Amino acid sequence: MVSRWRVPVGRAAALVFLLLLAACNAHVDSFSASSHTICAGQPVQLVWKVTGNATMTATPPLAPLAGGQVASEGQMTVAPSASTEILLQARRWLGKSESSVQTINVIPGQPKVEPLVVSLADSSAGCASGRVWATVHALRFTTDVKVSVVATHAGDSRTYDVQHGGASATLTPGMTVATFAGQPIVGDWVLSSPLLSGEVCGTSALPRSLVVDVYAQCSPEGKP
Amino acid sequence: MNPSELKQNVDTIVVVMMENRSFDNVLGYLRSPQHGNRADVEGIADPGDPSYLNPNSDGVGLAPYWTKDGPFPSDLPHSKDMVATQMAYAQVSKSYLMNGFVKAFEAQFHTTLDQSPVMGLLTRADLPTTGALADRYSVCDHWFACVPTSTAPNRLMSMCGLTNIDETGALVPDQPTVYDWLLAHNVRWRVYASGLPFLLLMPRLAPLMLTSHFRRLDQLPEDLASDPPNLRPQVIFVEPDYYDSPIHFHPPCDNHPPLAMAPGEAFLGQVYGWLTQDPTRWARTVLIVTYDEHGGFFDHVPPRPVRYRNPNGIAFDTTGPRTPTIVAGPFAPRGVNKTVLDNTSILQLLAERFGSPGEPYSAEVTGRTQQGIGSVSAVLSAAGTNSAVAGISVAPLAVASIDAHAPQGSTALRQCFDDATRAFVAQHQAEALAKYPELNSYLSG
């Protein structure tokens, strides 16, 4: 016969065991990089907080992270000269480990295409008077990452009116414009597009997102 | 196939429910000219299609990409909140845009990558079993997860037709299950579990787990060969060894990230091989290979508006994203089926086959039927002419090749399993340990 106490005691033991296990688990509470797209050698501030012991490693290696071990909470500046993945691992004795990765892209010598995209689920999206619009919030590009040219995305048949940094341009499918050359990519890009045949505001016939290809480069003149 | 044709032709219905993959992740390749070249399948014709771009938190679009099978560093986001982010409802178009998968991943894991694992698309080369079944039988490209949330509510919907929870996180509540329905209808049924059965998480069912209804996977081929016809189970649930289980009798093989697909492919291939061993029996079998939910992987097809409400306040307005479901067997025509289905479609099928004429499975399942969720019977053809067996070549699943104590990552579901396992042994000590002797070492470890 099963004791009346056996089940509660067993459950209590299991609960204690689970609480102990949970207490042992490491966790990445936060990990961020001030910039994800930079010019070679520019500083990027990393900020992190983990529960447990933290190690940070970079691929390819970066000098400040040679030791691996870092404080469980802190910040550090790195200056990659090539695109780098920075891995933060949280560990605790007996518990499971957890890791996060921040990728820092270094713009190479040639312009690199960045498809700037905004979902129409974004709060900036709107649709009226035969047009649909939304704003891409281009974040975590350093100000030295400049626009070379702007083009429509391959396979996109829309026409766009584009506004960024006080300038504006109209992009038809297949078109490339140098209107924004030399401006920092970071900031808001307002995209507005006439509705295509069959598209109706307030219906699922609208596009899912608006997109333009921005070619990023690090030369200050921003020449194509 | 109508109910009388089902009763006339189908002796055995086999259900294998895997874990956490989206249709596009597993079978999206079928549409691609270079990988599957099947224009009839609602998959990924071109990953470069701008409508598939998912913005990351910097405003940069990430496209889906062809990838190789392999393990992941972690699970992927698929809680209720995260699924809402992924499905991305837009006021401006009153529709779900399916472009929040990257943002959900970045938010949950504080991770930014140029190629987000949620956007990966597998190809035929890494799917020796699923790919072969997709080539041979009915691909259901409008089969959705029942509800837009995580494992436990979706498995409850699948196995009960209703859920009293909307998130995974504790032992599952006591609900009437498909096992109760089958018992009430005098249907012979069994569960063959590669590891611990999922509904161990429902404490009321623990005594049932100790009966001969629940068997070890390794017993399946022997039973298939030796059961006399009048004792053969009419419904068989085959369960993989769950990644989130705290103890494994086989390598975990449910396809739940961080697992790769390879162990699950071996498991499925082995099960298919056993089921097709006897051509006479296979000729009267329907095999359904499905998933509980999408697991956080990108899928481009918006969910269906299926409203679900229950008296406990559980509320959903849509299905979840699609899952890669295949219906196999001689009655499953080679090709693609466009019927809108979810895992409650299996319950409809059971009612049609084993219920009284016109008897629905339950009011809840009927509620879904009335909102457009069909039955698996819509996939089946009474002609039963698809009798050739798919050629599948995978290595059999190894037995107990991993440390039973190996921590598999602490997730809400794993904690539920651990709690349920300990309660199971506490309540049914001798019988539980006799049936699952591996639990001895787990509990003393």
Image (cartoon, coloured by chain):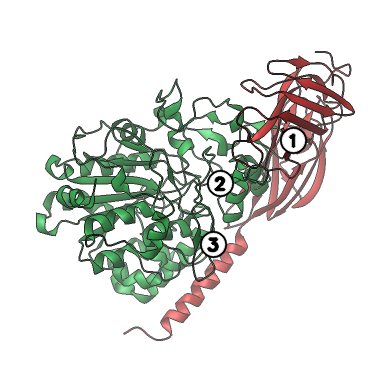
Chain colours: A red, B green
Mark 1 closeness class: few <14, some 14–19, many ≥20 residues within 10 Å: few
Which amino acid does the dot numbered 1 rest on? Ser
Specify the subunit that label 1 lies on.
Answer: A
Task: Work out whether residue B191 can be spotted.
Answer: no
Residue A4: image quadrant is bottom left
The residues bearing labels 1 and 3 have C-alpha atoms spaced at a distance of 36 Å
Eyeballing the image, is B89 above or below B113?
below
Task: Work out whether residue B283 can be spotted.
Answer: yes
In the image, which disc is placed on residue B76?
Answer: 2
Specify the subunit that label 3 lies on.
Answer: B
Q: Nearer the viewer, residue B39 or B206?
A: B39
Specify the subunit that label 2 lies on.
Answer: B
State yes or no: discs 3 and 2 in contact (Cβ < 8 Å): no
Which amino acid does the dot numbered 3 rest on? Ala
Question: Which tag is nearer the camera, tag 1 or tag 3?
Answer: 1
Q: Nearer the viewer, residue A134 or B249?
A: A134
The residues bearing labels 3 and 2 have C-alpha atoms spaced at a distance of 23 Å
Tell me the residue that label 1 is attached to: A129
In this rendering, would B408 be left or right of A31? left
Eyeballing the image, is A109 above or below B178?
above
Tell me the residue that label 3 is attached to: B315
State yes or no: discs 1 and 2 in contact (Cβ < 8 Å): no
Residue B313 is situated, as x and y percent measured from the top left of the image, at 54, 68
Which amino acid does the dot numbered 2 rest on? Leu
In this rendering, would B257 be left or right of B82? left
Q: Secondary structure at mark 1?
A: loop
Q: Secondary structure at mark 2?
A: loop
Marker count (numbered) = 3
Question: Which tag is nearer the camera, tag 3 or tag 2?
Answer: 3
